[in-house]
Amino acid sequence: MKTRFRLLAQRIRDEMEEIERTVDAVGRHWRRFQKARTDQDAFLNSVALNLHGFYSGVERILELIALELDGGTLGGEAWHAELLRQMQSSLSQVRPAVLSHETADWLDEYRKFRHRVRNIYATNLVPDRMQLLVRDLPSGWRRLRHELETFATFLENLAGKNQSKD
């Protein structure tokens, strides 16, 4: 049992490192988009792809938690939104809430954007809509990273308590 919790904590931290690089890329490429005299669309497309990747990485973490601790993954048409709601709930005798309501609401905007990116042509990206996501990403990521780190520490503590059950 303890190995499973430690492994999940490590997988969360590994994903967080990748997400960190993605957040940095969003900021760099947005600045280049704003300054570029040519090929602006290439930088805008990169920002969109990295925002998509950001949310996909977060969702991978949340899916791992749902699978390993909550008894399985969700199904149905609205499972992506349901996953965010599920992670706001603490499960008695299993785990605390992973996300605060504030963070889950913030993440929902990135989930919606990812859905749009998957369903439109890149030539239809709207920079003004993306600007808020780019602007809010660093502070929101700091809050999310703290919440995920707190949860990973919970898992490690849980592994320590379950040493005799391993």
Image (cartoon, rainbow, N blue to C red):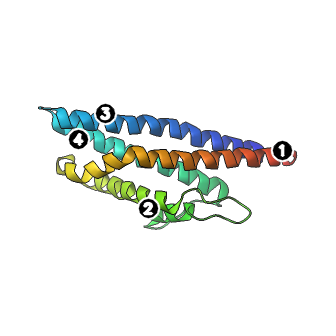
Could you tell which of marks 1 and 2 lies nearer the N-terminus?
2
Query: Does residue 154 lie above or below 106 as drawn?
Result: above
- The amino acid type of the residue labelled 1 equals Gln
Q: Is residue 120 above or below residue 51?
A: below
Q: x, y percentage for residue 89?
A: 59, 65
Decide if residue 159 is on the left or right side of residue 112: right
For the residue marked with disc 4, what is the amino acid?
Answer: Leu
Residue farthest to the right, as pictured = 164
Describe residue 148's horizontal placement relative to residue 106 as left or right: right
Reading the image, the residue beneath label 2 is 105
Measuring 33% from the left and 37% from the top, which residue is drawn there?
27
User: Which residue shows up at 85% across the image and 49% down it?
Assistant: 165
Of tags 4 and 2, the one toward the viewer is 2
Determine crowd level at label 4: few under 14, some 14-19, many 20+ residues with C-alpha closer than 10 A. Answer: many
Q: Callout 2 environment at 10 Å: few (<14), some (14 to 19), or many (20+)?
A: some
Q: Secondary structure at mark 1?
A: helix
Pick whichever of labels 3 and 2 is earlier in the sequence: 3
Residue 153 tag number = none
Q: Residue at x 40, y 37 (%)?
A: 22
Q: Are the residues at dot 3 and dot 2 in contact (C-beta closer than 8 Å)?
A: no
Pointer 1: residues within 10 angstroms few (<14), some, or many (20+)? few
Question: Pointers 4 and 3 in contact (CB under 8 A)?
Answer: no
For marks 4 and 1, the one nearer the N-term is 4
Task: Identify which residue, 164 or 97, lies in the foreground.
Answer: 97
Viewer-nearest of labels 4 and 3? Answer: 3
Residue carrying label 1: 163
In x, y percent, where is residue 7? 67, 41
Of helix, strand and loop, which one carries label 2? helix
The label shown at residue 44 is 4
**Alpha-carbon span between mark 3 and mark 1:** 44 Å
Asked whether the viewer can see residue 126, the reply is no
